[in-house]
Image (tube, helix red, strand yellow):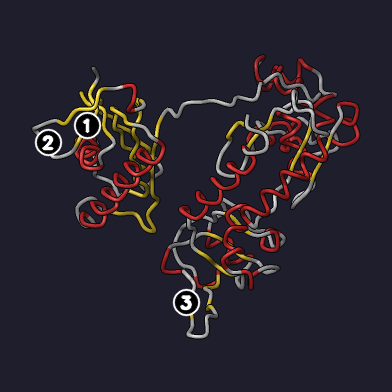
Amino acid sequence: MFFAGVELLRYPELRGLPVVVGGSSHQAPKTHADGSHRFARLRDYTGRGVVTTSTYEARALGVFSAMGMMKAAKLAPDAILLPANFDSYRHYSRLFKQTVASIVPHIEDRGIDEIYIDLTDVPEETHALALRIKQAVHEATGLTCSVGIASNKLLAKICSELDKPNGITILADADIPQRIWPLKASKVNGIGPKAAQKLAALGIFTIGELAQAAPDLLQESFGLSYASWLIAASHGQDARAVVTRSETKSVSRETTFERDLDARLDKATLSNAFTALCLRVAEDLKRKGYVGRTIGIKLKYKDFRTVTRDLTLDIYTQDAAVIRRAAGECLKRVPLDQRLRLLGVRVSGLSRPDALSFTANPEQRELAFTVP
């Protein structure tokens, strides 16, 4: 809902309407001379893209993230369709996190719209602190947020989902049987669709039923390690600490094409997309303050087979031209006899520039970082 919330800041006239974010830039709203907008409708979409997100009104019609756009169009043909604007989402994400960090500095970043905060040593009463954070976030961004407060990360995550939108949920461990056990097992972060299906086949649908399940039955179906975790999670047990510092291991970008592309017939289109991905990865590296030496590519064929290749350079770089050349070398090692549905570029083996000596390579126009 975060992406949709950012779009509603730009187009407040869409509040209360079913809105789907996805598609491509040619579905952007048209602005009239009087400042009003003409929006594309989901029924007009053609292609095989997927829904990035949807408003609660669209979700009430059955449209959810990761759903195919054509399927969504059958469910909600009159829904408004907006293209995703990830630069804008990143901007509001930074505002959100900077605002919270100004109140409670030690946070764990869990993605563009989610964080964990360790309140163990914070003297302020938790409900009052949650209200203060929510108010500050709204003043800084215009967006609302939901807060879950519990004894550990697993329970806090569940609680943050219970009273959306714009809610505060505080859970004591004694409340687990009444508040948590009636929920679907899939509400536990870590129980995905496949695990939920296997549990359903065992007659286990809720977290409470999972908590009462025989350990031997779970172990037989899931193995010892995952079964042990399922039992602990169903009882609200989670020993993970809030991690306030972590290093990025890789930076990547990928794109799924509207139609399968042929390496020979669509050479220009593929080349432009390939170059654009390298440029975006280079921009991400510079923005995040990293350089890297291992350049990799990812291809997905029309039959959904995926292949990857990588190449480790003698230099550290954040230069798009260097990345493009290395990625091109990787591409030469991949069979291109099938049409392609996805292309991706990745840089790993990252380091901070200040940990390396900065030199200019006289044989190249670009600047690179070399190991001292």
Nearer the observer, 214 or 207:
207
* Most distant residue in the bottom direction: 34
Amino acid on which disc 1 is placed: Ala
Label 2: few (<14), some (14–19) or many (≥20) C-alpha neighbours in 10 Å: few
Q: Position of residue 62 (x, y in %)?
A: 68, 59
Quadrant location of the C terminus in the rendered image: top left
Numbered circle sitting on residue 30 = 3
* Residue at 77 percent of width and 39 percent of height: 129
Numbered circle sitting on residue 364 = 2
* Most distant residue in the left direction: 363
Among numbered discs 1 and 3, the one appearing first in the sequence: 3
Residue 246 relative to residue 318: left or right? right
Place residue 105 in its image quadrant. Answer: top right
Among numbered discs 2 and 3, the one appearing first in the sequence: 3
Instruction: Say if 253 sits above or below 67 in the image.
Output: above
* Residue at 49 percent of width and 55 percent of height: 88
Q: Which residue is mark 1?
A: 368
Q: Secondary structure at mark 1?
A: strand
The label nearer to you, 1 versus 3, is 1
Amino acid on which disc 3 is placed: Lys
Q: Secondary structure at mark 2?
A: loop
* Residue at 60 percent of width and 63 percent of height: 9
Q: Secondary structure at mark 3?
A: strand
Q: Position of residue 334 (x, y in %)?
A: 24, 36
Amino acid on which disc 2 is placed: Gln
